[in-house]
Image (cartoon, rainbow, N blue to C red):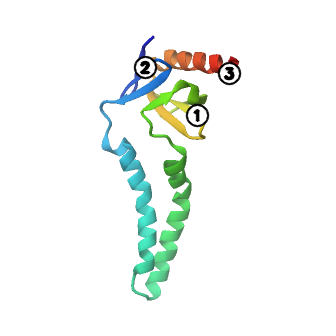
Amino acid sequence: MNHEFVTVYGKAIIEKDKLFIRSLDVPFSKTAFSQIAYELFFVVVFALQFFKEHGPMVYVSLLAWGVVFAFRLPAIYDVLFKRSYASRIALNKIKSMEIEEDTHGLQIFIILNLQNNRYRKIPFRKLENQYEPFTEVISHHLTSFQLA
């Protein structure tokens, strides 16, 4: 049985106990490549500070970039190790589901927590009400797998 849901950037399709996420129109800033590259930029700049010529300004810039790197460390960890970029997820690999609203109230994020301790965040438009049937189908599969 196929279920098809419209997301912000494409479609979420459930067929044969698998969730397929088709991204049709994703802005470059929302792609996995740009998110990983943005976070790794701070790591590269911090590492390059060690190869500068020695002088008093090197220590100041090293300290400044070290502070920036320390503040970006949780985001780097999240992007590299916690977030899942898979476009095909088996429904039996979903451990739990959370619903989160954005700050403007226009989008709903469905966060699927997977068994490998990663998560996949799927954005839905709130006015289209596609997230409600999607959560019903996912919760149905969650309860059926928990009962088995």
Dot 3 amino acid type: Gln
Q: Please tell me whether mark 2 or mark 1 is closer to you in this view.
A: 1
Q: Is residue 66 above or below residue 41?
A: below
Q: Which residue is mark 3?
A: 146
Q: Residue furthest bottom?
A: 55
Q: Quadrant of the N terminus?
A: top left
Quadrant position of the C terminus in the picture: top right
Give coordinates of residue 42: x percent, y percent: 44, 63
Identify the residue shown where x is 41% and y is 19%: 5
Side of 142 relative to 41 (left or right): right
If you read the primary sequence from the N terminus, does the residue marked by circle 2 or circle 1 appear first? Answer: 1
For the residues marked 3 and 2, what is the alpha-carbon distance in whole angstroms?
Answer: 31 Å
Quadrant hosting residue 15: top left
- The front one of 100 and 14 is 14
Q: Is the residue marked by circle 2 packed among few (<14), some (14-19), or many (20+) residues within 10 Å?
A: few
Could you say which is closer to the camera, residue 78 or residue 117?
117
Q: What is the CA distance from the residue labelled 2 to the residue labelled 1? A: 24 Å
State which mark lies toward you, 3 or 2: 3
Asked if residue 44 lies left or right of residue 94, the reply is left
Write down the residue under mark 2. Answer: 127
Residue 130, horizontal then vertical, whole percent: 45, 18
Residue at image x 37%, y 42%?
A: 30
Dot 1 amino acid type: Asn
In the rendered structure, which disc, 3 or 2, sits on the residue that comes first in sequence? 2
Residue that numbered label 1 is attached to: 113
**Residue contact between numbered discs 2 and 1, judged by CB atoms under 8 Å:** no
Viewer can see residue 56: yes
Q: Residues within 10 Å of mark 1 (few under 14, many from 20)?
A: many
